[in-house]
Image (cartoon, rainbow, N blue to C red):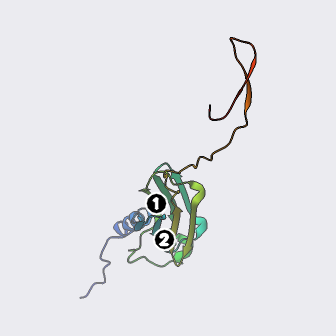
Amino acid sequence: MQMLMEPFAPWRRDLYRQLTRSTPAGFFPAADVLVSDEDVTVHLDLPGLRADDVEIELDGDVLAIRGERRFPYGEDKAGGATWRRIERPFGAFERSLRIPRGLSPDAIDAAMHDGVLTVKMRKPEKARPHRVDVRAEERQAEQVKSPESGRSEKQGAAA
Protein backbone atom coordinates (compact mmCIF):
# COMPACT_ATOMS: atom_id res chain seq x y z
CA MET A 1 0.00 0.00 0.00
CA GLN A 2 1.37 3.37 -0.98
CA MET A 3 0.79 6.24 1.41
CA LEU A 4 0.76 9.83 0.38
CA MET A 5 2.66 11.73 3.00
CA GLU A 6 3.79 15.27 3.32
CA PRO A 7 7.57 15.50 3.75
CA PHE A 8 7.08 17.60 6.89
CA ALA A 9 4.43 17.54 9.54
CA PRO A 10 2.01 20.48 9.17
CA TRP A 11 3.37 22.28 12.24
CA ARG A 12 6.96 22.04 10.88
CA ARG A 13 5.84 23.32 7.47
CA ASP A 14 4.08 26.30 9.09
CA LEU A 15 7.09 27.03 11.29
CA TYR A 16 9.39 26.93 8.24
CA ARG A 17 7.10 29.34 6.37
CA GLN A 18 7.08 31.74 9.30
CA LEU A 19 10.86 31.67 9.65
CA THR A 20 11.56 32.14 5.95
CA ARG A 21 8.96 34.87 5.68
CA SER A 22 10.16 36.91 8.63
CA THR A 23 13.90 36.62 7.98
CA PRO A 24 14.69 36.89 4.29
CA ALA A 25 18.35 37.26 3.43
CA GLY A 26 19.70 40.74 4.12
CA PHE A 27 20.32 43.09 1.23
CA PHE A 28 23.91 44.35 0.92
CA PRO A 29 24.40 46.09 -2.45
CA ALA A 30 27.77 45.86 -4.19
CA ALA A 31 29.66 49.14 -4.62
CA ASP A 32 32.52 50.42 -6.79
CA VAL A 33 34.42 53.57 -5.78
CA LEU A 34 36.51 55.27 -8.50
CA VAL A 35 38.79 58.19 -7.62
CA SER A 36 40.33 60.45 -10.28
CA ASP A 37 42.09 63.81 -10.15
CA GLU A 38 38.82 65.66 -10.81
CA ASP A 39 36.15 63.64 -8.99
CA VAL A 40 35.04 60.63 -6.96
CA THR A 41 32.41 58.31 -8.48
CA VAL A 42 30.46 55.60 -6.65
CA HIS A 43 28.41 52.96 -8.49
CA LEU A 44 25.99 50.93 -6.34
CA ASP A 45 23.83 48.05 -7.62
CA LEU A 46 20.26 48.65 -6.44
CA PRO A 47 18.01 46.43 -8.59
CA GLY A 48 14.32 47.03 -8.14
CA LEU A 49 14.71 50.36 -6.31
CA ARG A 50 13.60 53.80 -7.44
CA ALA A 51 15.35 57.10 -6.78
CA ASP A 52 12.76 57.84 -4.04
CA ASP A 53 13.82 54.69 -2.16
CA VAL A 54 17.41 55.92 -1.60
CA GLU A 55 18.87 58.46 0.84
CA ILE A 56 22.43 59.83 0.53
CA GLU A 57 24.33 61.71 3.22
CA LEU A 58 27.90 63.05 3.31
CA ASP A 59 29.48 63.59 6.74
CA GLY A 60 33.18 64.48 6.62
CA ASP A 61 34.87 61.66 4.73
CA VAL A 62 32.01 59.14 5.04
CA LEU A 63 29.37 58.79 2.33
CA ALA A 64 26.30 56.97 3.69
CA ILE A 65 23.75 55.46 1.29
CA ARG A 66 20.56 54.05 2.83
CA GLY A 67 17.40 52.49 1.54
CA GLU A 68 15.20 49.44 1.55
CA ARG A 69 14.47 46.78 -1.00
CA ARG A 70 11.01 45.70 0.10
CA PHE A 71 9.95 42.07 0.25
CA PRO A 72 7.46 41.75 -2.64
CA TYR A 73 5.68 38.57 -1.55
CA GLY A 74 3.35 39.60 1.25
CA GLU A 75 0.30 37.54 2.12
CA ASP A 76 -1.87 39.60 -0.22
CA LYS A 77 0.58 39.30 -3.16
CA ALA A 78 1.28 35.58 -2.80
CA GLY A 79 -2.31 34.70 -3.69
CA GLY A 80 -2.18 31.51 -1.64
CA ALA A 81 0.97 30.26 -3.41
CA THR A 82 3.55 28.31 -1.45
CA TRP A 83 7.06 29.67 -1.46
CA ARG A 84 9.52 27.06 -2.59
CA ARG A 85 12.67 29.14 -2.81
CA ILE A 86 13.57 32.76 -2.04
CA GLU A 87 17.13 33.52 -3.13
CA ARG A 88 17.01 37.23 -3.90
CA PRO A 89 17.97 39.43 -0.94
CA PHE A 90 15.54 41.98 0.50
CA GLY A 91 15.44 44.37 3.41
CA ALA A 92 16.86 47.65 4.64
CA PHE A 93 20.48 48.45 3.87
CA GLU A 94 23.10 51.05 4.67
CA ARG A 95 26.49 51.35 2.99
CA SER A 96 29.05 53.66 4.56
CA LEU A 97 31.97 54.33 2.24
CA ARG A 98 35.10 56.26 3.15
CA ILE A 99 35.96 58.86 0.52
CA PRO A 100 38.64 61.59 0.31
CA ARG A 101 38.21 64.49 2.75
CA GLY A 102 37.19 67.97 1.66
CA LEU A 103 34.40 67.09 -0.79
CA SER A 104 31.50 69.50 -0.66
CA PRO A 105 27.94 68.17 -0.20
CA ASP A 106 26.87 70.86 -2.69
CA ALA A 107 29.06 69.24 -5.37
CA ILE A 108 27.27 65.86 -5.33
CA ASP A 109 25.28 64.60 -8.31
CA ALA A 110 23.30 61.34 -7.95
CA ALA A 111 21.28 59.48 -10.59
CA MET A 112 19.62 56.05 -10.97
CA HIS A 113 19.69 54.21 -14.28
CA ASP A 114 18.82 50.54 -14.90
CA GLY A 115 19.12 49.63 -11.21
CA VAL A 116 22.52 51.28 -10.75
CA LEU A 117 22.94 54.34 -8.53
CA THR A 118 25.78 56.61 -9.68
CA VAL A 119 27.00 59.24 -7.23
CA LYS A 120 29.56 61.70 -8.60
CA MET A 121 31.35 64.20 -6.36
CA ARG A 122 33.64 66.88 -7.79
CA LYS A 123 36.87 67.41 -5.93
CA PRO A 124 37.60 70.98 -4.89
CA GLU A 125 40.36 72.79 -6.73
CA LYS A 126 43.63 71.92 -5.06
CA ALA A 127 45.18 74.63 -2.95
CA ARG A 128 48.17 75.80 -4.88
CA PRO A 129 50.48 78.78 -4.59
CA HIS A 130 49.19 81.86 -6.33
CA ARG A 131 51.74 84.44 -7.38
CA VAL A 132 50.82 88.05 -6.73
CA ASP A 133 52.47 90.63 -8.98
CA VAL A 134 53.65 93.79 -7.27
CA ARG A 135 53.23 96.85 -9.43
CA ALA A 136 55.57 99.79 -9.20
CA GLU A 137 53.89 103.01 -8.23
CA GLU A 138 55.55 106.42 -8.44
CA ARG A 139 54.99 108.69 -5.50
CA GLN A 140 54.79 112.39 -5.85
CA ALA A 141 57.10 114.50 -3.73
CA GLU A 142 55.60 115.06 -0.30
CA GLN A 143 56.01 117.94 2.11
CA VAL A 144 57.55 116.69 5.32
CA LYS A 145 58.22 118.94 8.33
CA SER A 146 61.54 118.52 9.98
CA PRO A 147 61.02 118.04 13.72
CA GLU A 148 64.15 120.00 14.55
CA SER A 149 63.67 123.08 12.46
CA GLY A 150 59.93 123.19 12.17
CA ARG A 151 60.29 124.15 8.51
CA SER A 152 59.09 122.23 5.48
CA GLU A 153 61.45 120.17 3.40
CA LYS A 154 60.73 118.50 0.11
CA GLN A 155 61.31 114.78 0.08
CA GLY A 156 61.30 112.76 -3.11
CA ALA A 157 60.26 109.17 -3.61
CA ALA A 158 63.85 108.01 -3.92
CA ALA A 159 65.19 109.86 -0.87
Query: How dense is the environment of label 2, judged by Cα within 10 Å: few (below 14), some, or many (20 and up)?
Result: many
Q: Residue at x 28, y 84 (%)?
A: 3
Q: Quadrant of residue 12?
A: bottom left
Tell me residue 10's x, y (percent). 37, 70
Q: Amino acid at mark 1?
A: Phe
**Residue located farthest toward the bottom when viewing the structure as drawn:** 1
Residue linked to disc 2:
46
Image quadrant in which the N terminus is located:
bottom left
146 or 25: which is nearer to us? 146
Mark 1 / mark 2, whichever is N-terminal: 2
Tell me residue 14's x, y (percent). 40, 67
Query: How dense is the environment of label 1, judged by Cα within 10 Å: few (below 14), some, or many (20 and up)?
Result: some
Q: Secondary structure at mark 1?
A: strand
Whether 144 is drawn above or below 60: the answer is above
Residue linked to disc 1:
93
Whether 35 is drawn above or below 115: the answer is above
11 or 105: which is nearer to us? 105
Whether 34 is drawn above or below 155: the answer is below
Q: Secondary structure at mark 2?
A: loop
Residue 10: mark: none
**Residue located farthest toward the top when viewing the structure as drawn:** 148
141 or 89: which is nearer to us? 141
Q: Amino acid at mark 2?
A: Leu
- Left or right for 110, reference 18: right
